[in-house]
Image (spheres, rainbow, N blue to C red):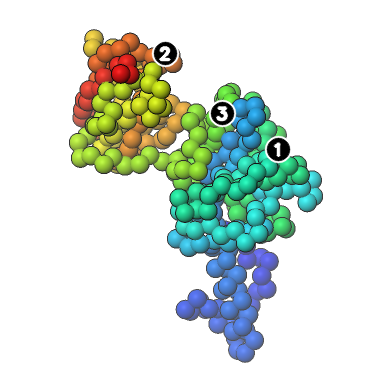
Amino acid sequence: MMTLSLIPVFTTRTLRSGRFLIGRGKGVWAGLFLGAFLLAVDLAGAVRINEVAFNEETGSPDWVELFNEGDQPVPVGEWVLDDGDAASGKHIFLPDGLVMPPGVYLTVMVKAAGASIGDFSSGSMTVYSGTATTVSLAATEDQVGLYSGRSLSSATVVDFLAWVTDGDYGGALDRAHVTAFLAGLWPEDGAVDLSRPVKGQSVGRRRNGQGVGPAAFQLFTRPTRGASNEPAPSPFASALSVDPARRSFSPFDSDPSYQTTSFYFNAGLTAVKTLRVLDRRGNTVRTLVENDREPGGIDFSGLGSGRVVWDGRDDGGQIVPLGLYLGLFEATDPSSGATDRSRAAVAVGRPK
């Protein structure tokens, strides 16, 4: 995002070695200042709103996750999160001196008090807004803007997200939406349309830090707070594999790590992918991926490899009978219509 209208305009300029050479004498120093300003703007634009939970279970605070998609550290101390109608001085201010290294996630717990968790050494960190803020994320519709300074304007807005769950978005004239529209980050009257989300879900970017506008976001029934919205690639060469340590698993196990298994797939980048779990009679008990979409989860379009978790339940949410099941992976070439099919067996049992 670059807003040059706020910078003095000089008549002659050429970009050379990161400097603007403008006339003679003082123009060079002005050019150096301008180059530093634009560099700061470019760095700020690398930090994006990656995921937001606005309808958490009672007793759990809502949260906003930020992601640094760039390759440089970004100082975010005193940056601001605003929901468009927070009282003056009651916004969420990120901790002074905080710097986000490249590729890390920062989760901000909204209207909650607590000690910061982590320091980015594991790839993520959690901070708390405190309870003095009037920022509050509504489940029916709301918005959140990220600003690189205390002045909330189209010159400082870095990213923006608006959502609606009742089909009638009315926040186009709210402060955060207006600044995002003027900065070219969001359409004039648009929001991510989410149909009746239940508690514990989130809205996030389909691809970490990428895309602009409502189309870049989707509903996640399984939020990925402090972690990637995208699946990890398969570590196996075959088209479909089951986690070797979970070829047999049990939803009844007391250890949560043994209550699920994972399917890993490999396919062409353009292939349309479907993954189903079949019983011994060949009936579909669970559709894990259909037409590149994990229901309420990851969008696999354009990805050639990935991982999908199965919890041993059918499409109705019931635990399947004990026994042997078959994962059926289909990758369809959109040009020819040809479909490659691969299978992998998995057993659902009882814990020992």
Left or right: 133 in relation to 245: right
Which quarter of the image is occupied by the N terminus? bottom right
User: Badge 2 local density, few (<14 within 10 Å), some, or many (20+)?
Assistant: few
Residue 9: x percent and y percent? Answer: 65, 74
Direction right: furthest residue? 88
Instruction: Identify the image quadrant of residue 40.
Output: bottom right
How far, Cα to Cα, is label 1 from label 2?
35 Å
The residue beneath circle 2 is: 318
Tag of residue 338: none
Q: Residues within 10 Å of mark 3 (few under 14, many from 20)?
A: some
Name the residue tied to disc 3.
200
**Residue 136 tag number:** 1
Instruction: Tell me, yes or no, if residue 210 can be seen here.
Output: no
How far from the left and from the top, in percent, is residue 44?
Answer: 57, 59
- Residue 32 or residue 56, whichever sits in front: 56
- Location of the C terminus (image quadrant): top left
What's the residue at 20%, 40% (across, down)? 237
Q: Is residue 321 above or below residue 185?
A: above
Residue 98's spot in the image, x, y percent? Answer: 59, 58
The one nearer the camera, 76 or 175, is: 76
Looking at numbered disc 2 in the image, what kind of residue is underneath it?
Gln
